[in-house]
Amino acid sequence: MSEDIHWFVGRDGRTRGGLGVTPFRAFFFCLQDGKLVTSVDFDRQGLEDEIRTRRAAGRETAQFEDALAELAKLNCLDHLQRCQEVWVGLWRGQRHVVFDPLIQPDNSEFILLYFVEGRALCARKRANERYELSPVSNPRDRDFALEQYCLWRSTHAHIAAEKKARRAFEEEYPPPARKKCPDCDCHTHWSDLVNKPRYEMRSELTVVAEPCPSCKGEGFVRDVFES
């Protein structure tokens, strides 16, 4: 008999958390030979315990780890969307940033900003940033930035904790907002020379040239998480 595990993350209709909000849980059900054998659901702590138990027993954990990441992302996003103190803005009018008051250091000279494009939490001087930041007015941009921040925090919470506890800072410049296109590796166009399509820089020798659909022929794409 073969064990077939399926899962999804959804709201728990039986309990309510703070402010009467129904928390997210990870729901699993197991099929054997096409028939439902068992079903179980976990909160985050319960799912972490289950992963440790399965590892100790030498059992498969990949799907449980995927569910844990999804659960952490959704709970984080749900919290941030309801938290009015979390601020989303534009840095120098171009790059999305998230200011999370829960991870700010005691050193009041600096603030921690998460740069969405570039996927980095950077220490910046508070006095300077008041002139660099502007608010985001589009709700879709705010939701996108918050989702990106949650994806980062679900696997990099230790970085946020370390920087929050740090006392001495040096100003950190954010990494580039774009990265090389993974599909064309900056060669921007594909060509058909002797019926051998390949990506290369556009030239006069190119018989047929089409821009890379991922980067639209620019060679670079935004450095963000795929959600």
Image: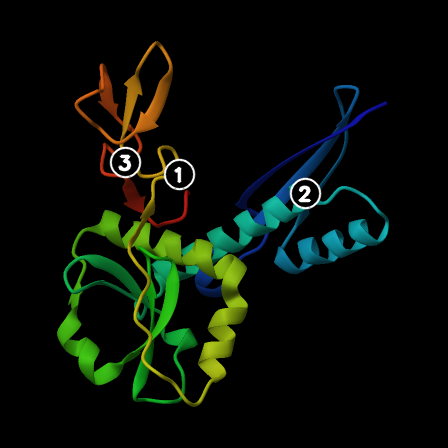
Query: Quick one: which residue is furthest to the top in this view?
Result: 195
Callouts 1 and 3 close, C-beta under 8 Å: no
Q: Residue at x 76, y 56 (%)?
A: 52
**Residue at the (47%, 71%) spot, across then down:** 160
Crowding near the residue tagged with mark 1, few <14, some 14–19, many ≥20 C-alpha atoms within 10 Å: few
Sequence-wise, which precedes: disc 3 or disc 2? Answer: 2
The crowding category of the residue bearing disc 2, from other C-alpha atoms within 10 Å (few below 14, some 14 to 19, many at least 20), is few
The amino acid type, in three-letter code, at marker 2 is Ala
Q: Position of residue 175 (x, y in %)?
A: 33, 62
Task: Give percent across and percent down for residue 181.
Answer: 34, 40
- Residue 215's disc number: 3
26 lies above or below 106: above
* CA separation in Å, label 3 and label 2: 31 Å
Q: Disc 2 and disc 1: Cα gap in Å?
A: 25 Å
Secondary element at image label 2: helix
- Residue 62's label in the rendered image is 2
**Which residue corresponds to the image point at 21% horizontal and 20% vertical from the top-left?**
205
Q: Of callouts 1 and 3, which one flags the residue occurring earlier in the amino acid sequence?
A: 1
SS at mark 3 in the image: loop
Q: Quadrant of residue 99?
A: bottom left
Residue type marked 3:
Cys
Q: Which residue is mark 1?
A: 182
Mark carried by residue 130: none
> From what the image shows, is residue 135 above or below residue 194?
below
Pointer 3: residues within 10 angstroms few (<14), some, or many (20+)?
many
User: Which is more toward the observer, 196 or 225?
Assistant: 196
